[in-house]
Image (cartoon, coloured by chain):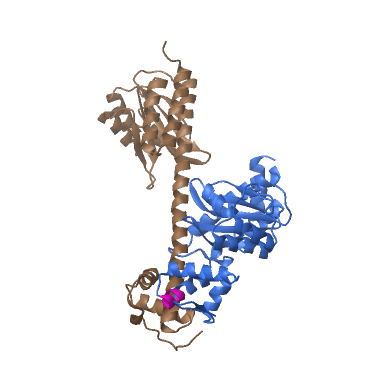
Amino acid sequence: MPMTREAKFARTLVELADTLVVGFDVVELLTVLADRCVDVLEVDAAGLMLVASDGNLRVMASSSEAMRLLELFELQAQEGPCLDCYRTGKPVVNQDLAVTNGRWPRFTSEALAAGFHSVHALPMRLRGAVIGALNLFHVERGKMRQVDIDSAQALADVATIAILQHRAALQAQILNEQLHHALNSRIVIEQAKGIIAERQHLNMEQAFSTLRSHARNHSRPLVEVAEAVIDGSLSTSSLHHTGSKGRS
Amino acid sequence: MAGGERRLRILDLLIGCGDTALCTSRLCEVCAQVTGMNGAGVMLMSGEVPRGSLCTTNEVSDAIEQLQYVLGEGPCVDAYRQDWPVLEPDLANPQSPRWPAFCAQAIAAGARAVFGFPLQIGSVRLGALNLYRDRPGPLTDDQHADALVLADLVAQSVLVLQANAPANTLAVELEAGADLHYALHQASGMVSVQLGVSVGHALVRLRAYAFANGRSLADVAESVITRTVRFTATGDEG
């Protein structure tokens, strides 16, 4: 017995969730999404565009690698339903290409030449943030059923949440690494100060100014000089304290 | 109380209380106040070891942080390592035998119940929030829920503040009330020269000396820096 649409849809959600658990990969997630739109929602082609850091839409995944289809996505960095959908954050659905000629002249003629007659774009958005659009194509003219539009939007929503979560996690990871780096840098500098203070009979302030003037005079980062003092590659006898000597 | 409402109520306390946008100087006070505890502290960890504390509300919470820093054991260290809240409602009668050195000294310092909550954002771990009370007893569900929200907000605040700091530098807002044991690291550098050993080894010797003489690590570090304690290969002289 063939699977019902509901069962296929449910299976697709599980499949999307699975791609999130093991080694998240945006392209893989979006490729699964594009493929399932074709399988489950009976569209003829599907693709996903995400906005890049330069503010332009880039094609991230496509249900087919056919050059004509890929070109249709590429084109939409300039004009087309995806760009409109991305800019407004609203769905652009049931566009009959036979009658939209004025809206997207270049996109429309290329799409018709590729054999498509109906096109839809659904926003990938979470609250205020729109990060891209899901693009669906039909060969036949005619309207997509609302239930199918809703299903496609639901799949796009799942992918959007996953991508935004992943970005937030990456950002947090980078900041955390910077934090630990800052903490470690400071520790290394304090340790080097102690070494210089002991070797040259200086107080901590004098030891620090010795370390800092060496770094400045040799145009090396302070942390790097401190590390060199600790690992012994920079002998403390080559460091010179310029102010008055004294024991703290 | 709904989760969103709880978060808003706590955010309200954290935002705009004076000097900085996120109220870092009062971060720990807010944590203690919201949960109705006697005190709170925020410990930063890196790798598997404590790095120091961002803030503490009073001497007892400071002692709890210092003990975990020196001993490398305790509820915050475990909360961080296990990615899970670690609750000890009665240090005098622990539910499972753990942290033998920590428990006795934490009680002596004035704590009876200690609760550690990991500071984490997704898989990113920063440290732990530590709450204490001078009487035994578990957290109520409400206090527990508040602590989880607080830990999340503190973790986010730390990263947001650090985001604006220059490379290799700790954000000034974080630095302000923090105890990151700078004197101890200076002393480690000095002792490494005195003994001709690595700074890591020197730190171990400092810890051993503090433990053997019943002195705090900060106190010993200060003595080394002021040159009233000197380490020699044959033994330590005062």
Residue positioned most to the front: B234
Image quadrant assignment for residue A65: top left
Judge whether A9 appears above or below B25 on screen: above
Which quadrant of the figure contains the N terminus of chain A?
top left
Q: Magenta part of the protein: which range?
A: B190-195
Residue A158 place in picture, x, y as percent: 48, 33
Residue positioned most to the left: A67
Which chain has been coloured blue in this picture?
B
- Which residue occupies 59% across, 50% down? B117
Question: Does residue B17 show up?
Answer: no
Residue positioned most to the top: A1
Residue A73 place in picture, x, y as percent: 33, 33
Q: Is residue B193 magenta?
A: yes
- Which residue occupies 45% across, 15% down? A4
Which chain has been coloured brown in this picture?
A
Left or right position of B50 against A121: right
- Camera-side residue of B223 and B29: B223
- Camera-side residue of B205 and A149: B205
Judge whether B59 appears above or below B13 on screen: below
Judge whether B151 appears above or below A135 on screen: below
Q: Is residue A122 magenta?
A: no
Residue B66 place in picture, x, y as percent: 59, 63
Most common secondary structure along the magenta stretch: helix
Image quadrant assignment for residue A48: top left
Image quadrant assignment for residue A94: top left
Question: Does residue B114 show up?
Answer: yes
